[in-house]
Image (cartoon, rainbow, N blue to C red):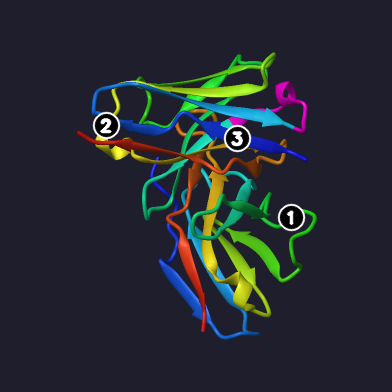
Amino acid sequence: QSALTQPASVSGSPGQSITISCTGTSSDVGRYDLVSWYQQYPGKAPKVMIYKVTERPSGVSHRFSGSKSGNTASLTISGLQAEDEADYYCCSYAGRRTDDYVFGTGTKVTVL
Amino acid sequence: QVYLVESGGGVVQPGRSLRLSCAASGFTFGSYDMHWVRQAPGKGLEWVAVISYDRTSTFYADSVKGRFTVSRDNSKNTLYLQMDSLRVDDSGTYFCARVLATYSLDHWGQGTLVIVSS
């Protein structure tokens, strides 16, 4: 199972909106509405920001939203803030065959 | 408060073994599937393995299948990862994580570092 494809980096100015794409296949992203997104600061554990494509855990800012079309999922951060500068990873359930879950390659978000 | 604390990492030579532990507290450990996820230095996250809440099912990434074994002791609230035939590319930080019915990993440990080097 290959990693999901994400852009290596995305940047934006404070207040702007950015979108991170996550491209998989018909066996993972395209097959299941079970994509989650994780935020990770350097040296820290990941934190779930979005689950089941569009759902937001309690405590996560409404500025974070998710969507999916076909084999590609997306994470949008609206009203970009300095604290949003981090690495972001998508993750999809891939079925109980070989790899149960597959992560994306990761995207570094820079706030200009 | 949910806590997951990994331990057991260290420096080991290629071909040797290591066992990682993940001590859980603050929730009913025996009710949740648990995962191991690793991250090579400066690299992205890689899913490693999962074990069901009742130990009846385990699944592994192709990269570790046949070499790593995930297990758990629900009476001790502890998750394990037995790593045999270690390779240099197994080096990295190993995280344990709890998974919800929503298929999201909602709580993670702080990670334990494994370095495989001669």
Give the residue drawn at x 29%, y 39%: B89
Residue B105 visible in image = no
Vertical comparison of A40 with A95: above or below: below
Q: Chain of mark 2?
A: B
- Give the residue pinned by disc 1: A55
- Residue B48 image position (x, y, % from top left): 46, 34
Percent x, y of residue B4: 64, 36
Label 3 neighbour load within 10 Å: few <14, some 14-19, many 20+? some
Nearest-to-viewer mark from 3 and 2? 3
Looking at the rendered structure, the kind of residue marked 1 is Glu
Give the side of residue B19 with respect to residue A29, left or right: left
Tell me if A1 is positioned left or right of A63 in this view: left
Please report the residue visible at 65 percent of the width from the left and 62 percent of the height from the top: A67
Mark number, residue B87: 2
Percent x, y for residue B33?
A: 65, 28
Say whether residue B25 is magenta. no
Residue type at tag 3: Val
Magenta residues (range): B26-34
Residue at the location (25% across, 28% down)? B13
Nearest the viewer among A29 and B41 is B41
Q: Element type at marker 2?
A: loop
The residue carrying mark 3 is B5
Q: If you read the primary sequence from the N terminus, does the residue marked by circle 3 or circle 2 appear first? A: 3
The image shows residue A67, relative to residue B58, as above or below, that is below
Determine contact: label 3, label 2, CB under 8 Å: no
